Amino acid sequence: MIKVIAADDHCIFLEGVKSLFLSSPSISLFEICSDGEELLALILKHQPDIALVDISMPGPGIENIVERISGLDINTRLIALTMHLEAGRASRLFALGLSGYVLKDDAFEQLTMAIQAVASGDEYISPRIVSAMNSASDRDVSLTAREMEVIKYLSDGMTNKTIAQHMGISERTVRFHISNCCLKLDANRRSGVVAKALQMNLIC
């Protein structure tokens, strides 16, 4: 069972999230709150597998929350919820340690998939955000040597932690490389990155 906390200052949205997971056999939404400070306190108390974080709720900003949780010795992974297609912000948050980025308009179709992906060590970005990121960057498909190395390790089924150890970098940097690969290859998760790389004969 994946333990989840959700933080959002819109009660109607939170009620919808509660209903979504009410009968889920694999996801348990056991705490909700409406601001960043309460969220941080709940994460420290319960150390859930996943925290769903509204980008624009009161309290500490999403960047501050991601940095603080990434700096702690706990396994909670964060998925940001947003109303806006903010390509640059998505890239910055993944560089800080975010694990998922989901549009609220698509949340009820994608949240279960996103939570399961992130809980298994993957990253997840809503496809429409990937498209916006591609448009914002003119879709630069040239991959750096580091990105190619990450893709090769992903194709071997390695976790972020193992990739970090092999490359001598932090897991945060691995996540940043993966988000860049998602952007450049028009994929919304690591399996999509590997599939696109194989399709384009970037790896064999």
Image: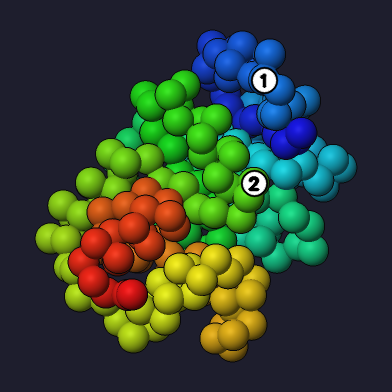
Relative to 3, say whether 18 is above or below. Answer: above
Under mark 2, the amino acid is Ala
Residue 24, label in figure: 1
| Residue 90 visible | no
> Marks 1 and 2, Cα distance to the nearest angstrom?
15 Å
SS class, disc 1: loop
Would you call the spot at circle 1 few (<14 residues within 10 Å), some (14-19), or many (20 or more)?
few
Residue highlighted by disc 2: 119
Check the image and tell me how it is coloured. Answer: rainbow
What residue is at 61 percent from the left and 11 percent from the top? 19
Q: Position of residue 13 (x, y in %)?
A: 52, 17
Relative to 128, say whether 88 is above or below. Answer: below
* Residue projecting furthest to the right: 45
Under mark 1, the amino acid is Ser
What residue is at 35 percent from the left and 78 percent from the top? 148
Instruction: Please state if 194 lies on the left or on the right of 130 as rendered.
Output: right
Of 19 and 24, which appears nearest the observer? 24
Residue 96, label in figure: none
